Image (tube, rainbow, N blue to C red):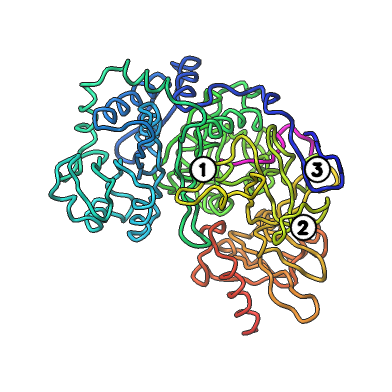
Amino acid sequence: MTDGTTDPGLALVRGDPLESETVLGALTLPGFLREVTARYADREALVMYQAGAGTERWSYAELWRRSMAVARALVACGVGKDSRVGILMTNRLEWVSACFGITLAGGTVVGLSTFATPDELEYLLRASAVSIVLYEPHVLAKDFTAILTDLEPGIASAAPGRLASLRFPFLRRLVAVGAAPGGAIEAWDAFLAHGDTVGEDIVAARAEAVKPADPALLFFSSGSTGKPKGILNGHRGVNIQSWRWTRIYDFFNDPHPVRTWSANGLFWSGNFSIALGGTLAAGGTLILQRTFRPAETVALMAAERVTFPYCWPHQWAQLEAEPAWPEADLSAFHYFDAEINLRRPQRTITTTWTDPRATYGSTETFTISTAYPVSAPREVWEGCNGGVLPGNTVRIVDPASGETLRRGETGEIAVKGPTLMLGYIGIPSDEALDAEGFYRAGDGGYLDERGRLVFQGRINDIIKTGGANVSPVEVDWTLCSCPGVKVCKTTGVPHETLGEIVVSCIVREEGRTLTEAEVIAWLKARLASYKVPRKVLFVEPGELDLTNTAKIKPAEARALAMRKLAAA
């Protein structure tokens, strides 16, 4: 990491030149797939288990063949340069072949969340202007065929490719994995059959014409501050990060190819980049599970000899609560964060590897902007969110004036570099970026005297207590490893003299009798005194949706804490 500023006291740090990232390969998704297929053709790329249907395995060569089949069908159905094609599926083989197939045909992948409500799905389809949707008919209790037909009744009567909708004026065709009810919706096999009229040479020519600066993926933000924003990322940024994870995770120093499992959807940038991109870049295997079922997951991890389980702390808690967890053979685990959870008999753990928690990023930068690799000593990464990555520039600005602050001063994080988004759909670039081309993240933090980034949460969420800034994110990362804590969320509550006090809401693990005193003692040994909560509130899951702490709106947590404190 270098600092190219003339004033070393300014909160502005430039990373090393991008050329120093020696692990980079092809910088388009078609080129990426071609390169990893050439290197690892016979290796196992994807594994998909379905209860009652057995296990299906694809090699890299098979993934190429299947992706080419999707691409040929899309070309036959009229997909051209930059056409947007939606994928509405869980983590399954067809998601991956569809993704690469769309880009081989020259199109842009639109990731559609299977968690979307009907109203949200309508918004995503309209905003993205997709021409084709490849979808999974049933996801848990959701019937997407019924939802789509309710949104546009004309789907039931139109022929495939002939849909004419005023609500979705660009949408012409829908393709269902498996059988289809008819109308504008085609079955998967019937859709693929269109490709029989298109030669592989045509697809190869299109793939060759794709450039690193072209649009690759359109993913949507969570929408926690309003309607989800459509974030358009170019091939170059997506692929830089995929290759880069092999260095960050040190994949090539493992004598065996990485075997990754993840609980999270591939339509989220972090999971796409790390679980899919990083695994394939290293010649590893991605274990696919359609939906997160903890009991099924424990068995799958053991049977498939998973080395890299990638999920959130609340999902770890659910895995650890499974009766089969303590005795399951998870001896293959190598890439995991032992400091967060994984409280198991030490005889089953044979690695000292820990996850690179010292990172910061967003979908706008297609994941990480700062990081340290897993090989970095603790004294290098502890207490921060990483050093600035090659090609990037990070600065801390005053949220109101935009002026660059000094080292150690809290302000808004601003980033630019080679993985920065192409832009938000429907928003002019001068509104998405500042006058100097930086993406202003809305996140608060500071650059320390060593040029390391310290992320403190959303600007409006940073807790100001007794003149000090406390990051609720830091408290939660520490608290989630406390024995007896299933899920936690920290917030600030108004206080007459301190301004705010730190309060943590906790759901206990079943059968545990964790007390406030025990939690505070745990944190005092690990955090500065001003960061330790003044109050710990034990809540029931029904009082606040704590099933996914990353999506809880801070205002909801704050309101709950204030209600419980007032009642007490």
Q: Name the residue at 55% across, 45% down.
A: 363
Q: Which residue is mark 2?
A: 410
- Marks 2 and 1 sit apart, C-alpha to C-alpha, by 27 Å
| Mark 3 or mark 2: whose residue is earlier in sequence | 2
Question: How crowded is the residue under tag 3: few (<14 C-alpha within 10 Å), some, or many (20+)?
Answer: many
Residue 252 placement (x, y as % from top left): 63, 23
Give the residue number, with chain letter if any, for mark 1: 269
Query: Mark 1: few, some, or many residues within 10 Å (few <14, many ≥20)?
Result: many
The first of marks 2 and 1 along the sequence is 1
Q: Are marks 3 and 2 in contact (CB under 8 Å)?
A: no
In the picture, the disc for residue 130 is none
Where 223 sits versus 565, above or below? above
Q: Amino acid at mark 2?
A: Thr
Residues rendered magenta in the picture: 366-378
Residue 398, picture quadrant: bottom right
Q: Position of residue 313 (x, y in %)?
A: 59, 51
Q: Amino acid at mark 1?
A: Ser
Q: Amino acid at mark 3?
A: Gly
Say what secondary structure mark 1 lies in.
helix
* Residue that carries the numbered disc 3 in the rendered image: 451
Residue 452 forms part of the magenta stretch: no
Q: Is the C-beta separation of discs 1 and 3 under 8 Å? A: no
Foreground: 196 or 343?
196
Q: In terms of secondary structure, where does tag 3 sit?
A: loop
Which quadrant does the N terminus fall into? top right
Say left or right for 315 vs 98.
right
Q: Residue at x 70, y 77 (%)?
A: 494
Residue visible at 70% across and 55% down in the picture: 412
Q: How far is disc 1 from disc 3 in space, using C-alphas?
A: 26 Å
The kind of secondary structure element at disc 2 is loop
In front of the other: label 2 or label 1?
2
